[in-house]
């Protein structure tokens, strides 16, 4: 699977997600975060999704189940 980085456009939250595609990455985020963040991850005007190329170099394992690998809250 691929590794994706999802970021809120206000810079408050970022997620590292293992999923098959961009849409799947958003779906993993929606299913695995608090309900008050549902629209944040669904709406492309509120968040961005980028592929992390060569994730092994950054310490992320692409093999495994779809999941949120890391969540970071920025202040």
Image (spheres, rainbow, N blue to C red):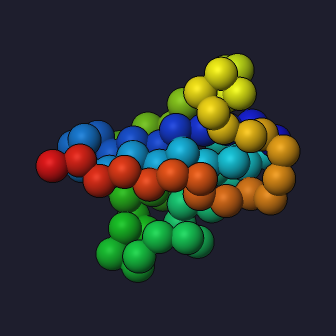
Q: Nearer the viewer, residue 38 or 11?
A: 11
Q: Nearer the viewer, residue 31 or 14?
A: 14
Q: Give the left or right position of residue 49, taking residue 13 as reference.
A: right
Q: Residue at x 69, y 48 (%)?
A: 18
Residue 55 in sight in this render: yes
**Quarter of the image holding residue 68?**
bottom right
Q: Note whether 40 is above or below 19 in the view shown.
A: below
Residue 47 in sight in this render: no
Of all residues, the one furthest to the left in this rendering is 75
How many numbered tags mark residues here?
0
Q: Residue at x 77, y 40 (%)?
A: 62
Q: Note whether 45 is above or below 28 in the view shown.
A: above
| Residue 19, image x, y percentages | 73, 49
Q: Residue at x 54, y 60 (%)?
A: 29
**Quarter of the image holding residue 39?**
bottom left
| Residue 1, image x, y percentages | 81, 41
Q: Give the left or right position of residue 29, taking residue 23 as reference.
A: left
Q: Note whether 15 is above or below 39 in the view shown.
A: above
| Residue 20, image x, y percentages | 78, 45
Q: Residue at x 37, y 51 (%)?
A: 72
Q: Nearer the viewer, residue 39 or 11?
A: 11
Q: Give the left or right position of residue 38, taking residue 75 as reference.
A: right
């Amino acid at each position: 699977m691929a590794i994706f980085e999802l970021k809120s456009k206000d810079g408050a939250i970022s997620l590292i997600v293992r999923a098959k595609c961009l849409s799947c990455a958003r779906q993993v985020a929606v299913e695995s975060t608090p309900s008050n963040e549902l629209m944040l991850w669904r709406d492309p005007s509120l968040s961005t999704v980028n592929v992390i190329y060569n994730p092994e170099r950054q310490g992320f394992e692409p093999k495994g189940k779809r999941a949120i690998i890391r969540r970071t809250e920025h202040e």
